[in-house]
Amino acid sequence: MIHQLNDRHAIESQLKFIDGTTEFRPEQIVSLPEKVADFPIIQIENNFAKAAISLYGGHILSFQPVTESEDLLFLSENTIIQSGKAIRGGIPVCWPWFGPHPEHSDLPSHGFVRNRFWSVLSTATTPKGETQIQLRLTDTPETRKLWPHAWELVLDIIVGDTLTVGLITRNRGNEPFTITQALHTYFQVGSIDGVRILGLDRTEYIDKVDSGAQKFQAGGVEITSEVDRIYTNVPPQLIIDDSTWKRQIQVLSKGSSSAVVWNPWSEKAAKFPDLSDDDYLKFVCVETTNAGPDRIQVFPGSEHRLESKIRN
């Protein structure tokens, strides 16, 4: 598979496919489906940045601009990548529902696309010299048992000095459907106690740690305990101010009026086998979402694009 992908889609001196079972944290990749002989990962290095993208989950694992000594994304060293499990860190794709299924608690949290292999639609170099990748996933008899609709997803990724991620939902059926979704981004930080998230002052949020109570944000968001909040009517730009590493990460969104801020803190993090006990100090999730009351109806033959741009 790796050889075929490189023959069709590699870009000389910029993009290649590697086998994650031997070339990208191979000790973490186990229990793959028998039909998958290897674990394709797209490795990108251009004049602007380095990045890595897993075809499993359509999952961006890494993004590091050339101006940065540290990756902008957090990927847990304890992540065990195996069939049917989501990768902890990077940018998981949550779709067609965010969080628990609204009606059926036995269905997987955050939907079902983050633990399936996506196909490669195209790779290209933009006129600026950035690297563009498009991945695709469609409904199958298996997915229709979980969610009875005909659909196509395209993940449109551009790696330059800015990481642009567009998640395009297309309705291929005859009836409208409603989705919630997220680009569930884990941002790497120097230390969580030196982080402030700017842009949410005076914004209303749903506090999931406090039984869904409706609250208002006052000032910048600081993380001193478990945080799990859906902010509503958010502005299109948020900033992660990291005083430890003396950098600011900008998160710009389109097709979204909500955002999620999440950190499990120490007690909950200790219950996650794919997080080290102190990992909660090293990341904050600032997620570009359609979540809470921000629900998207997609009509037959139409599409919706959720977009996040990340830059320092």
Image: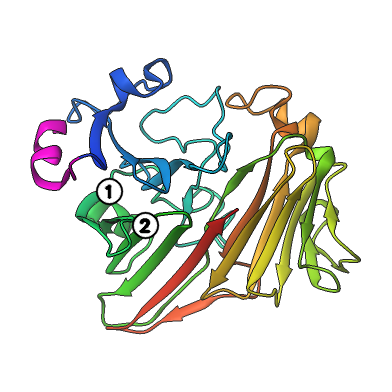
Q: In the image, what residue type sits under mark 2?
A: Ile
Q: Position of residue 193 (x, y in %)?
A: 84, 39
Task: Calculate the distance from the C-alpha at mark 1 to the C-alpha at mark 2.
Answer: 13 Å
- Residue beneath label 2, please? 157
Callout 1: SS: loop
Q: Quadrant of residue 137?
A: bottom left
Identity of the residue drawn at 47% across and 54% down: 161
Asked if residue 95 shows in the view, the reply is no
Position of the N terminus, as image quadrant, is top left
Residue 206 vertical position relative to residue 119 in the rendered view, above or below:
below
Q: In the image, what residue type sits under mark 1?
A: Trp
Q: Position of residue 32 (x, y in %)?
A: 30, 26
The 10 Å Cα crowd at callout 1, few under 14, some 14 to 19, many 20 or more, is: many
Asked if residue 142 shows in the view, the reply is yes
Identity of the residue drawn at 28% across and 62% down: 126
Identity of the residue drawn at 27% across and 48% down: 118
| Residue extending furthest toward the right | 218
Q: Nearer the viewer, residue 219 or 173?
A: 219
Q: Within the magenta stretch, is there residue 10?
A: yes
Callout 2: SS: strand
Q: Nearer the viewer, residue 296 or 251?
A: 251
- Residue beneath label 1, please? 118
Q: Read off the magenta span.
A: 1-12
Q: Position of residue 295 (x, y in %)?
A: 56, 75
